Image (cartoon, helix red, strand yellow):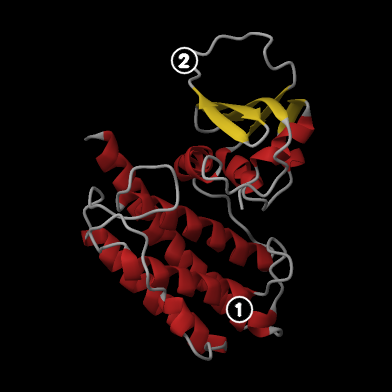
Amino acid sequence: MSKAQEHRQLWLAALRADGPATRVAFEEAAASEAGLSVPAPSCPGWTVLDLVTHQAKTYLWVRSHVARGVTSRPDHDPREELAELPTGTAAIQWWSDEYDALVGLLETLDPQLPAWNWAPAPKLAGFWLRRMAHSTAVRRWDAQMALGQAEPIESRLAADGVAEVLETWLPAGRRSGPTDRSGVVRLVATDADDEWLVRLRGEGVALLDTDTWLDHDEHPTRVSARGTASDLVLALFGRVRFDVLEVSGEAALLTSLRAG
């Protein structure tokens, strides 16, 4: 099996697993005393209802442009046409309908189909299959965290999520952390046999080849962070603090890798 096929299977399997788990969390929240007004602590200021509606709108938007077969930026956003959004169990049903429609589309879509995306990455539909797998996994974690029962992101998917942040989010300038620091960061996934080296030069970010990169003194400021792949990707997306990891060196550098 080719690497591309392995990735496609990983992302589809993740969508099929995390989607139903997300719905269970949404339904448990709806059945609680506070209903979907339960706060989502990993997304300050949001409630579970915000998680539901935001993700449903995301699925709707991706469905609207991913299968066009062109790389131009979409000039239509169906989210802008939404009137009053549903609440309660109706909101969950809306999310479920959008999830089912998206997965059904992605299951039949050729990942090599030309498609726009916002990153310095190949303009192919596979970008969105990957992005939706990770988006769904993190939202599942958010919903479960609101109930105090968050389960880790599956290690292979989480390791790919770390790579996605370093390959697309940061080079695209989608950073929520400081952009005035320089140094080298090593991230090590203890449960996935993966590691990454990242060079920071202010607003510049470079993912280094760990097989060929030679150590030198160009960047005296360095930090190493080790932990499960799930903790690494959740830290990069600001869901957990970097101090859940085993950190050595200049810890302040890590916040410059935050995606947002």
Classify mark 1: helix, strand or loop.
Answer: helix
The amino acid type, in three-letter code, at marker 1 is: Leu
Horizontal side of residue 183 vs 24, given as left or right: right
The residue at the point 27 percent across, 39 percent down is 4
Q: Residue furthest bottom?
A: 84
Say which label, 1 or 2, has the lower sequence index.
1
In the depicted view, which residue is nearer to us: 22 or 173?
173
In the depicted view, which residue is nearer to us: 42 or 145?
42
The amino acid type, in three-letter code, at marker 2 is: Asp
Cβ–Cβ below 8 Å for labels 1 and 2?
Answer: no
Q: Is residue 186 above or below residue 258?
A: above
Q: Nearer the viewer, mark 1 or mark 2?
A: 2
In the depicted view, which residue is nearer to us: 187 or 31?
187
Q: Residues within 10 Å of mark 2 (few under 14, many from 20)?
A: few
- Quarter of the picture containing the N terminus is top left
The residue at the point 39 percent across, 58 percent down is 15
| Residue 3 picture quarter | top left
Question: What numbered label is drawn on residue 140?
Answer: none
Residue 106, how many percent across, how many down?
29, 60
Reading the image, the residue beneath label 2 is 211
Residue 152, how many percent across, how many down?
57, 50
Residue 99, how many percent across, how many down?
39, 71
Reading the image, the residue beneath label 1 is 49
Residue 224, how many percent across, how many down?
68, 25
Q: Is residue 130 above or below residue 181?
A: below
Q: Is residue 190 visible?
A: no
Cα separation, mark 1 vs mark 2, equals 45 Å
Horizontal side of residue 65 vs 182, given as left or right: left
Q: Residues within 10 Å of mark 1 (few under 14, many from 20)?
A: many
